[in-house]
Amino acid sequence: MAAIVLVEDEADLSAIVMDYLLAAGHQPRCFADGAEALAQVRVAPPELIVLDLMLPGLDGLSVCRAVRDFSQVPIIMTTAKVEEIDRLLGLEAGADDYLCKPYSPRELVARIAAVLRRAQPTSAPARLAVDDATRTVRVAGQALALTATEFDLLATMARRPGVIFSRAQLLDAAAGENLDVSDRAIDSHIKNLRRKLAAYLPGVELIQSVYGLGYRLEP
């Protein structure tokens, strides 16, 4: 059971989604206006937000960016726009997942469950420990030898496990003053990271590819 804020201005769709969320045991609140939803999230923070991209007044991207200024609450964005650039804009604004309309309410409920699982803290021993101060990484208790670029990529994803990072975002994180890092070079660095991680965690794929969007580090 989770407190969920649904921001959707299509009345018929919001009514159906609310029924599914209630049936799944959640405690949903629905808003048709972006500005109103943002104000309520500040007053009574939910455990997850389902946020439509196209809203009257304050659009979904603006709401998402504003929420990220004060909260890391998981956000699933929904929209009728299917172009890749629109998906990437939503993710770069801070969304944790993306669902294109028309979507199945059952799929939305399943996505919510998956995102909430990733957001839950775990008491299990950490498989991956990243120290930004010393720029060191330990995997299953063993030190991992990384290049500067590999560390920057891994540290960026480790700060927000479960969140999808586009190649552009990872490029910004890794480039710095290194002008030799290119968009496609990110794939090569990720491949090297996976190989090094697999040496200590065989059979575990910590860095996952999300088709057409980028990469994410599983908790």
Image: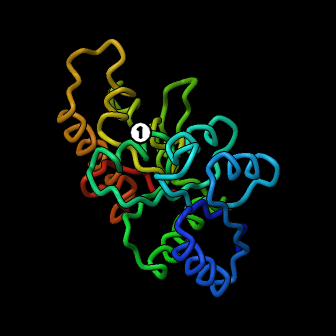
Judge the density around disc 1: few (<14), some (14-19), many (≥20) Cα neighbours within 10 Å. Answer: many
- Total labels drawn: 1
What residue does disc 1 label? 154
Residue 107, position as x, y percentages in the image: 44, 77
- Which quadrant holds residue 208? bottom left
Where disc 1 sits, the SS reads: helix
Residue most extreme to the bottom: 23
* Residue 12 visible in image: yes
- Which quadrant holds residue 5? bottom right
Residue most extreme to the top: 177
Rendered-image quadrant of the N terminus: bottom right
Residue 207, position as x, y percentages in the image: 36, 52
Residue type of the residue flagged with mark 1: Leu
The answer to whether 106 is drawn above or below residue 115 in the figure is below
Who is closer to the viewer here, 195 or 54? Answer: 54
Residue most extreme to the right: 43
Query: At x 34% / y 42%, what residue is drawn?
Result: 166
Query: At x 17% / y 35%, what residue is drawn?
Result: 184
Query: At x 57% / y 71%, what residue is drawn?
Result: 11
Query: At x 50% / y 43%, what residue is drawn?
Result: 61
Residue 99, position as x, y percentages in the image: 41, 64
* Residue 128 visible in image: no
Visual colour scheme: rainbow
The answer to whether 24 is drawn above or below residue 173 in the figure is below
Residue 153, position as x, y percentages in the image: 38, 35
